[in-house]
Image (tube, grey):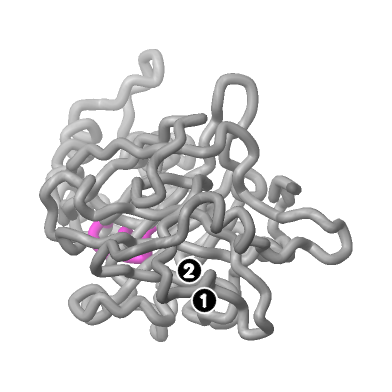
Amino acid sequence: MRLIGIISSKPILKLHTITDHYKPLYTKKGDIMNDKIKAFIEDFKKIENKETIKINLIPETKTSLTGSNVAGWFYLPKTANIPTTDRGEQLMYLAQINCEELPENSIYPVKGIMQFWIFGGDYNLGNDYRRPTSDSKKRVIYYPEIDEHFSEEELREMYEPQKDKKEDELITPINDGAPFAMSFEKTSQWTMPNDFRFEEVFVEKWNQNFPGKQIEEIYEMYDIDEEEVDEIMEALDISSHTQIGGYGHFTQEDPRMYDDFEDYTELLFQLDSEFGTDDYYILWGDCGVGNFFATKEQLRNLDFTECLYSWDCC
């Protein structure tokens, strides 16, 4: 098994610095923000909130075949097959969520099992950069009922995910600590800085709070002070992005910023890189993140054919 720990060749988006025209909005006493900035951040966190289920991963904890887990064993009804690529190569199981184990919510159905599969036969991990909705090397499957299913012993015989043919190893973001059980915490989330909707919300709120320092795009804030802006963005971020619902997190760019994908607003599942005791338990490339999105219509119909899958890293 080979950990996916490479650095992506995709360009990292940078906000460009322009000449400084404004007085600092911070009072620099031990890097303490001034009151106006603090109030702006707190106000921003109260708008555009979306229902979110935070997922806590519990390492080295085996679940039942129908239990919510990452990189454990999985539910497979006797009427189904392990999903494959369009070439017949088995996909790699990533995670499943038993809807009945979730706190009450309006994101997932109340029962059934949601599963997420990706390709472990190369370093793209099923990511199709040109068409991120393609199901050729990834799959999201919803089982509405729990029926008669294969045993763990049977699954061990059946499950042979495609390895990288050159290295004869499975390429995976799972480094250590598997299997992971899940616990869930219902919360809400303001618009995250890397989500494609962030700029519009941020600019509107900024201009309301600072009418004398109007901006049209976020990059104009670097006229103010790059370090100060970075601190604002850090204050609006969170430490872990493994979750259901809420807003997407990306280390480079949100693929939904392009017109063809802007309807994929519903975050089905997001798995962040996670550090364990001495090393990373989960590592997408260089500290990246993987996520799955659906449209509102897909979620209503519980049909996740060609949902949007993406992962990126620093």
Is 258 magenta? The answer is no
Q: Earlier in the sequence, mark 2 or mark 1?
A: 1
Look at label 1 and name its amino acid: Pro
| Residue 61 left/right relative to 41 | right
Residue 252 — which label? none
Residues in magenta? 195-202
Q: Main structural element of the magenta stretch: helix, strand or loop?
A: helix
Amino acid of disc 2? Tyr
Query: What kind of element bears circle 1?
Result: loop
The kind of secondary structure element at disc 2 is strand
**Above-or-below relation of 80 to 201:** below
Direction from residue 281 to residue 166 in the image, left or right: right
Q: Quadrant of residue 184?
A: top left
Residue 148 appearing in the image: yes
Task: Give how far across and how far down residue 286 sits, in percent.
Answer: 65, 45
Q: Nearer the viewer, residue 165 or 81?
A: 81
- Tag shown at residue 309: 2
Q: Nearer the viewer, residue 241 or 250?
A: 241
Residue at 86 percent of width and 57 percent of height: 167
- Percent position of residue 313, x then y: 60, 52
Residue drawn at (47%, 54%) of the image: 151
Q: Any magenta on residue 198? A: yes
| 133 on left or right of 28 | right
Q: Which residue is mark 1?
A: 132
* Residue 139: percent from left, percent from top: 48, 72
Q: Which is more toward the observer, 150 or 277?
A: 150
Q: Nearer the viewer, residue 28 or 256?
A: 256
The residue depicted at 41 percent of the width and 75 percent of the height is: 79
Q: Quadrant of residue 34?
A: top left
> Dots 2 and 1: beta carbons under 8 Å?
yes
Count neighbours of disc 1 (C-alpha within 10 A) and say few if under 14, some if 14 to 19, many if 20 or more. many
